[in-house]
Image (tube, coloured by chain):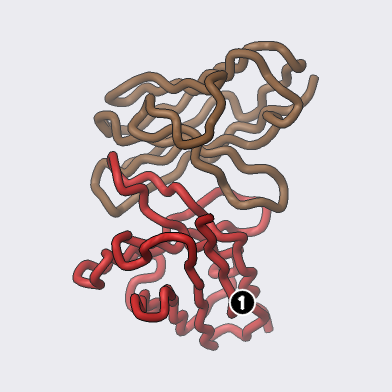
Amino acid sequence: EVQLVESGGGLVKPGGSLRLSCAASGFTFSSYSMNWVRQAPGKGLEWVSSISSSSSYIYYADSVKGRFTISRDNAKNSLYLQMNSLRAEDTAVYYCARDLLVGAGALDYWGQGTLVTVSS
Amino acid sequence: EIVLTQSPATLSLSPGERATLSCRASQSVSSYLAWYQQKPGQAPRLLIYDASNRATGIPARFSGSGSGTDFTLTISSLEPEDFAVYYCQQRSNWPFSTFGPGTKVDIK
């Protein structure tokens, strides 16, 4: 069974940092591109970042470029998101999600999410 | 950036009725469109990918159609568990992606 379990969320002050983790199991993690998607309270979904299976290709939404860093450790079946210079507008539930292997990159499995709250 | 518009914002229907949800893109996304269902407190679930392909385990009452800029998600006969928010997503310039604002399907 495919499982994605996020951790690392919490309350942080504006300007602070946080590192999110996503532990993957039930599939060959090293074969899949992975993503972070966030959802502000009561709002819609926003794609944040993607990383290819071997970390060769990394992409960010403009809203987080220069502040967030995505990475992965295929030996540990883990995905990470280092978030620096956090702002109030970064407050959201952060989901890790797997790229579907076929087709045009839909996201076929999602974790349960971890809440990040940026507030003084 | 490609903007997705979903209509209606809310759809009030009864169990057993047919639901038709629309997603329109500001420019062509070919067939690179997916649909997700999200229930309160849960992660999104993939329903349809590449405009018309059902994801693994998705019931046949869910179907998708369209290409270019206009897409439709149809639920042929609403079950009680189908009342949720539905999002469309485009990924025509992978991996960059945008989501629509969602359509809430609630019980009439």
User: Which residue lies at the image location 42% right of the left edge and 49% below the top edge?
Assistant: A107
- Label 1 crowding class (10 Å Cα cut-off): few <14, some 14-19, many 20+? some
Mark 1 falls within which chain? A
Q: Quadrant of residue A67?
A: bottom left
User: Which residue lies at the image location 53% right of the left edge and 40% below the top edge?
Assistant: B101
Q: Is residue A19 above or below residue B79?
A: below
Give B48 or B107, whichever is nearer the viewer.
B48
Q: Quadrant of residue A116?
A: bottom right
Q: Is residue A55 above or below residue B53?
A: below
Q: Residue furthest right?
A: B108
User: Which residue lies at the image location 57% right of the left edge and 47% below the top edge?
Assistant: B44
Q: Provide the secondary structure element on which disc 1 rests.
A: loop
Report how many numbered discs are placed on residues in the image: 1
Side (left or right) of B8 relative to B93? right
Where the C terminus of chain A falls, by quadrant?
bottom right
User: Which residue lies at the image location 60% right of the left edge and 69% below the top edge?
Assistant: A91
Q: Position of residue B41 (x, y in %)?
A: 71, 53
Residue on which the image places disc 1: A9
Q: Position of residue B64 (x, y in %)?
A: 44, 22
Give A77 or B72, whichever is nearer the viewer.
A77
Q: Which chain is red?
A: A
Q: Which chain is brown?
A: B
